[in-house]
Image (cartoon, helix red, strand yellow):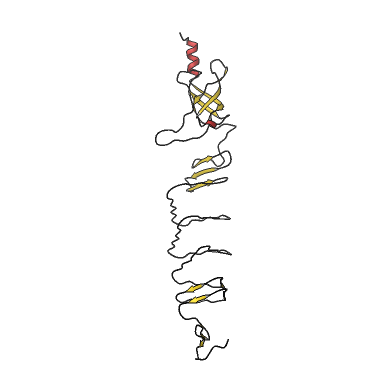
Amino acid sequence: MVTLSELWRRVQNMVVTARVEETMASDGKMLVRVRYTDKGTGEEHLSKWLPVATKNNSLMKVWMPVLAGEQVTVFRPFGDNDGGVVFTSIHWSESKEPDGANEHIAIVKFNDGCTVSYDTETKELFVKSMELIHMECIRAKVNASESVDVIAPKVTVECDTAKVTATNSTTVVTPLVTLDCDELHVTGDTQIDGDLTADGSLNIGETATIDGSTEIGSTLDVEGIVSDYMGVLSNFITSNGGTRVS
C-alpha cells in the first residue's frame, strides 16, 4: 500500500527540471537519460532512457537533436522515477536567448553560427550559412516585384537550356566576357562600341556597322556589300567610279 508520504513525494515529482546526461542522437534516436533531484527526498537520480516530445506525425517529421548538458522538463504522470516524457528546452544561464531576440523577430541559431531569422517589423527574412546552401527540387521560381541582387566573387550556372528575358534592357558590366560555345546566334541589331577581334570565320548576313577598329585573323564572309568612306570594298570600286589603290 502506498503511504501518504510516498503519494505526496510522487505528486511533487510529477513535473521536474532536469539536465540531459546522455543522448542517442548519434544513432538517430530521440531518447535521452536525464539527471534530476527528487523533490521529496533530495536525492539525485539518473533516469532510464526517456522519449523526447517533438513534432512528429504523418504530415511532417522534425529532427532537432537534444544535446548533453541541455536543461529540460520531465513530465511523469505518476511521479515514477523510471518513466516520463522529456520536453525541451529552457533558456538558462549556460544557454541564453540568441542575440537580437525581441518581440517581433523569430530566430533559429545553430551552434556553428548559422542563423535563420524573420523580422515582422522590417519584413526581412535573413539566412546566414557558414558554408553551403544546397537546394534540390524539380522546379524553382524566384518572383521579386522590384529587384534581385546576387553578390559573389564567382557565380556558376549549369543547365541544359538557359533563357534570359528582359522587357526593357540587359546590362553586363565586367572587364571580360567569355562565351565558350559551338555557335552564337544573335537576332536583331547588334551594336559594338569599341574594338572587335575575330580569330576565325565571321559571317554577316545583313548590315554591320562598326565604329572602331576590326581585326580579323582568318576569313570574313559577307553576304552583301562592304563599304567605307572611299566606297565599295567588295569589288574594289570607289564611290567616284575609280579603282581602289592598295
What count of labels does the image hold? 0
Specify the quadrant of the image occupied by residue 109. top right
In the displayed structure, would residue 216 be above or below residue 157?
A: below
Q: Is residue 31 at least partly visible in the picture? A: yes
Residue 206 in picture, x, y percent from top left: 45, 76
Residue 219 in picture, x, y percent from top left: 53, 75
Instruction: Determine the residue located farthest toward the top in the rendered image.
Output: 1
Task: Name the residue: 55% across, 24% down.
Answer: 34
Q: Is residue 90 at least partly visible in the picture? A: no
Task: Name the residue: 51% across, 41% down.
Answer: 107
Residue 13 in picture, x, y percent from top left: 50, 19
Of 146 and 137, the residue lying toward us = 137
Task: Name the residue: 53% across, 31% down.
Answer: 27
Of 14 and 188, the residue lying toward us = 188
In the displayed structure, would residue 72 be above or below residue 244?
A: above
Residue 183 in picture, x, y percent from top left: 48, 65
In the displayed structure, would residue 58 be above or below residue 138?
A: above
In the displayed structure, would residue 141 be above or below residue 221?
A: above
Instruction: Determine the residue located farthest toward the left in the rendered image.
Output: 58
Quadrant including the N terminus: top left
Quadrant including the C terminus: bottom right
